[in-house]
């Protein structure tokens, strides 16, 4: 049976946001030399995320101005080296795109919508910026927090799942959490936890996988997009080419079932 979301090539935006745009991602006046440090850091983070790497130190010096000019030139904006509203809106456009509400087709399930939102975030290529577990994407997924101890894999997975639930007007099976252990324990209480993979056909798209460290300790989590007999496909945050829980981006992976448990989502 064909999924109602199978035909979605481009996301059909409704013009609404599933969650409010963070205050820091809204225009609050021009940013240039002498602007508050936090706003300067935000500009430095975003130009770096757009591929114009510069030091994130809160100092709007010559390097930052040149980085902004390069960004402006690449995007057809007036090349001033200062961030006006048009430049700011272009800088934060990837986050705005990730937060757009997807129009749910009739019969769409929570799992299907979770995958659709995960792909929407993936298209914006969320990454860290300015340090370990730092930057606007980390703060989005971690409710404003960032730093070395803010492992954001669960923050990403549950944020996306909550977007899907909000769109459909349903509850998530397990309350949003930034803790892998809390997600596993909550899934057990909700009777939607599967230990290992006794039958891959039970792992529905939009379910969450957990990397098991011990019988009661899990160290990474992500979203299952498709399960096959020998492996499953994912979209996950705070990972890298090695599949580490301490990575730097949202990306797609293919994983083996060994050492994995699952939170099943219908």
Image (tube, rainbow, N blue to C red):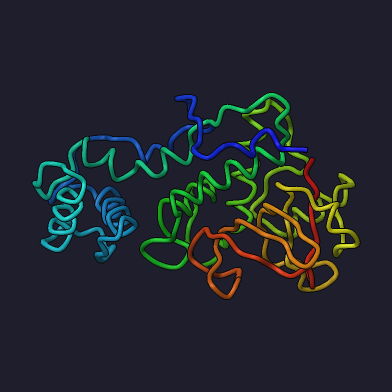
Q: What residue appears at the point 74 percent right and 70 percent down from the top-left corner?
A: 256
In the image, residue 136 sits, relative to residue 243, either above or below, namely above
- Kindly indicate the quadrant of the structure image that contains residue 57: bottom left
Classify residue 194 as left or right of residue 102: right
Residue 31: percent from left, percent from top: 19, 44
In the image, residue 32 sits, relative to residue 53, either above or below, namely above
Residue 130: percent from left, percent from top: 36, 63
The image shows a total of numbered marks equal to 0
Residue 159: percent from left, percent from top: 60, 44
Classify residue 238 as left or right of residue 83: right
Closest to the observer: 248 or 142?
Answer: 248
Q: Which quadrant of the figure contains the C terminus?
A: top right
Closest to the observer: 202 or 1?
Answer: 1
Closest to the observer: 8 or 19?
Answer: 8
Single out the residue that lies furthest toward the bottom: 242
Q: What residue appears at the point 58 percent right and 51 percent down from the top-left corner?
A: 156
Q: What residue appears at the point 60 percent right and 71 percent down from the top-left corner?
A: 243
Closest to the observer: 46 or 72?
Answer: 72
- Kindly indicate the quadrant of the structure image that contains residue 108: top right
Q: What residue appears at the point 79 percent right and 57 percent down from the top-left corner?
A: 262
Classify residue 62 as left or right of residue 86: left
Q: Which quadrant of the figure contains the N terminus?
A: top right
């Amino acid at each position: 049976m064909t999924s109602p979301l199978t035909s979605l090539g481009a996301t059909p935006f409704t013009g609404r946001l599933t969650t409010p745009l963070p205050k820091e991602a809204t225009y609050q006046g021009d940013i240039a030399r002498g602007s508050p440090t936090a706003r300067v850091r935000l500009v430095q983070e975003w130009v770096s995320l757009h591929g114009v790497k510069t030091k994130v130190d809160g100092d709007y010096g010559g390097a930052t101005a040149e980085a902004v000019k390069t960004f402006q030139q690449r995007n057809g904006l007036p090349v001033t080296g200062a961030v006006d509203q048009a430049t700011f809106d272009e800088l934060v456009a990837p986050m705005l795109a990730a937060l757009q509400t997807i129009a749910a087709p009739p019969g769409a399930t929570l799992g299907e919508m979770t995958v659709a939102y995960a792909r929407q975030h993936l298209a914006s290529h969320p990454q860290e910026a300015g340090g370990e577990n730092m930057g606007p994407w980390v703060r989005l997924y971690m409710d404003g927090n960032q730093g070395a101890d803010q492992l954001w894999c669960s923050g990403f997975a549950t944020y996306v799942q909550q977007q899907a639930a909000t769109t459909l007007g349903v509850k998530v099976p397990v309350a949003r959490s930034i803790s892998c252990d809390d997600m596993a324990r909550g899934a057990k209480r909700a009777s939607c936890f599967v230990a290992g993979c006794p039958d891959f056909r039970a792992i529905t798209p939009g379910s969450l996988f957990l990397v098991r460290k011990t019988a009661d300790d899990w160290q990474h989590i992500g979203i299952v997009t498709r399960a096959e007999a020998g492996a499953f496909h994912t979209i996950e945050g705070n990972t890298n080419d090695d599949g580490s829980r301490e990575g730097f981006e949202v990306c797609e992976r293919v994983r083996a079932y060994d050492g994995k448990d699952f939170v099943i989502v219908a």
